């Protein structure tokens, strides 16, 4: 089978099939979102527009949208564009971002499988397959049908922390992402424990600059946000689509104060173990795995994380699928669990079936398990002792 794959015509045929698969997926999305005569209503895009209108009328952004005020710079074009034009532009950029993430995963995994030989045809095949599979998952479904900002924040952190960004700039995009949405702040303790001092400084500077711009342009909103930066209770942590440990605990334990303490304890344990796993990955030269573990952790331990935050676990599934050896089986299982249709089926059954309610929590337990256990090792990883007392290599 391997010798057959080495034939040029076979590789080209597979590339054509993969590109066709991606093209068909894009056509399917176009039909879902823009194929009907009645305009599709993007919940979050419409919500962003209403929030901008409220701010323009003199209201506080926090009363409508609990995001750092600097995000208004990115959202403001929505208010000046016709609704359909804004929807098309936002969706197109989101789809292109998804394709870019697929290409990023292909770039990170291709050397593992080809032992350094990265042909253009093979890369196109793997990038197209990764992008198509990503677009067929429920987290991306949630992203696209709502028109969320989360994908941009996640992509900035992914490109930076996985090492796709030049080393001298690493940390800067994480800082910008954290200024737009606070969850990427999870990378700051990761930089500390892995002694990536340059990345830590870059992240802090970028975060401070972006946040400072928010204070200059929107002083009243910025002061209010940073004095009231806990909106979890307002957004509803008990909701079924809150994919966090807090959501899981609050749904099954009715006593709020006890549930809060249990969540903090679980978050601390999972967080420390994830840092340990990420540190070990980094020390073995497995920067992508370390970044993916930390990205998944940001959704698991946060007070609120909706399904579109879970693109991180899908990216981990794609990494396992394409990284070779036995990891592909685990990757395929993750992608099956987070496929577009399984969560929708469980959501329909959620109120009527205890089994469905229990199965629903797998969408939280599986990412938590990855945080605790880490991701599979790379075939070319460096064998080093993993004791927390051992000094790190100088990688900053």
Image (spheres, rainbow, N blue to C red):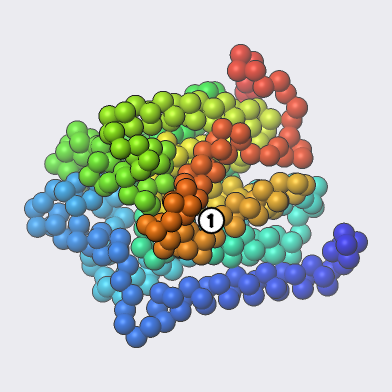
Q: Percent x, y for residue 182?
A: 35, 39
Residue 108 left/right relative to 53: right
Q: Residue at x 72, y 69 (%)?
A: 15
Q: Quadrant of residue 396?
A: top right
Q: Residue at x 65, y 18 (%)?
A: 387
Q: Nearer the viewer, residue 268 or 225?
A: 268
Where does label 1 land, which residue?
A: 338
Q: Percent x, y for residue 365?
A: 51, 42
Q: Is residue 109 visible?
A: no
Q: Percent x, y for residue 93?
A: 43, 64
Residue at the extreme left: 58
Q: Quadrant of residue 392?
A: top right
Residue at the extreme bottom: 37
Q: Percent x, y for residue 14?
A: 75, 69
Residue 48 left/right relative to 288: left
The vertical placement of 380 against 112, above or below, is: above
The vertical placement of 1 against 331, above or below, is: below
Q: Is residue 89 visible?
A: yes
In what quadrant of the picture does the N terminus appear? Answer: bottom right
| Label 1: how many Cα within 10 Å (few below 14, some 14–19, many 20+) | many
Residue at the extreme right: 3
Residue 20 left/right relative to 192: right
Q: Residue at x 39, y 59 (%)?
A: 352
Q: Nearer the viewer, residue 76 or 1?
A: 1
Q: Residue at x 16, y 38 (%)?
A: 224
Query: Which SS class for mark 1?
Result: loop
The vertical placement of 276 against 131, above or below, is: above
């Amino acid at each position: 089978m391997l010798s057959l794959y080495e034939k040029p015509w076979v590789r080209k045929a597979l590339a054509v099939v993969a590109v066709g698969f991606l093209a068909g997926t894009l056509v399917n999305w176009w039909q879902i979102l823009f194929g009907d005569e009645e305009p599709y209503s993007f919940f979050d895009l419409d919500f962003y527009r209403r929030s901008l209108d409220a701010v323009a009328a003199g209201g506080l952004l926090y009363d409508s949208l609990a995001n750092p005020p600097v995000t208004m710079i990115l959202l403001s074009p929505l208010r000046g564009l016709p609704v359909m034009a804004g929807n098309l532009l936002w969706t197109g950029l989101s789809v292109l971002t998804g394709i870019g993430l697929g290409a990023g995963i292909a770039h990170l995994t291709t050397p593992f499988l080809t032992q350094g030989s990265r042909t253009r045809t093979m890369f196109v095949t793997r990038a197209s397959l990764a992008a198509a599979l990503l677009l067929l998952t429920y987290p991306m479904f949630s992203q696209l049908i709502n028109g969320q900002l989360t994908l941009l924040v996640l992509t900035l952190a992914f490109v930076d922390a996985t090492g796709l960004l030049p080393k001298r700039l690493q940390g800067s995009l994480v800082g910008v992402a954290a200024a737009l949405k606070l969850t990427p702040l999870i990378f700051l303790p990761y930089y500390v424990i892995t002694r990536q001092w340059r990345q830590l400084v870059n992240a802090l500077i970028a975060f401070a600059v972006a946040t400072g711009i928010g204070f200059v342009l929107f002083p009243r909103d910025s002061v209010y946000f940073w004095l009231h930066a806990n909106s979890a209770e307002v957004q509803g942590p008990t909701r079924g689509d809150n994919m966090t440990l807090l959501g899981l605990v609050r749904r099954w334990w009715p006593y709020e104060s006890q549930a809060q303490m249990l969540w903090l304890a679980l978050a601390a344990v999972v967080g420390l173990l994830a840092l340990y796993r990420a540190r070990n990955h980094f020390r073995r030269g497995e920067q992508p795995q370390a970044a993916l573990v930390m990205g998944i952790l940001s959704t698991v331990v946060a007070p609120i994380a909706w399904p579109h935050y879970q693109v991180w676990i899908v990216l981990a599934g794609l990494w396992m699928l394409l990284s070779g050896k036995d990891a592909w089986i685990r990757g395929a299982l993750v992608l099956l669990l987070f496929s577009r249709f399984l969560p929708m089926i469980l959501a329909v059954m959620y109120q009527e079936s205890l089994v469905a309610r229990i199965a629903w929590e797998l969408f939280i337990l599986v990412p938590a398990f990855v945080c605790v256990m880490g991701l599979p090792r790379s075939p070319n990883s460096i064998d080093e002792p993993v004791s927390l007392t051992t000094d790190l290599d100088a990688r900053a």
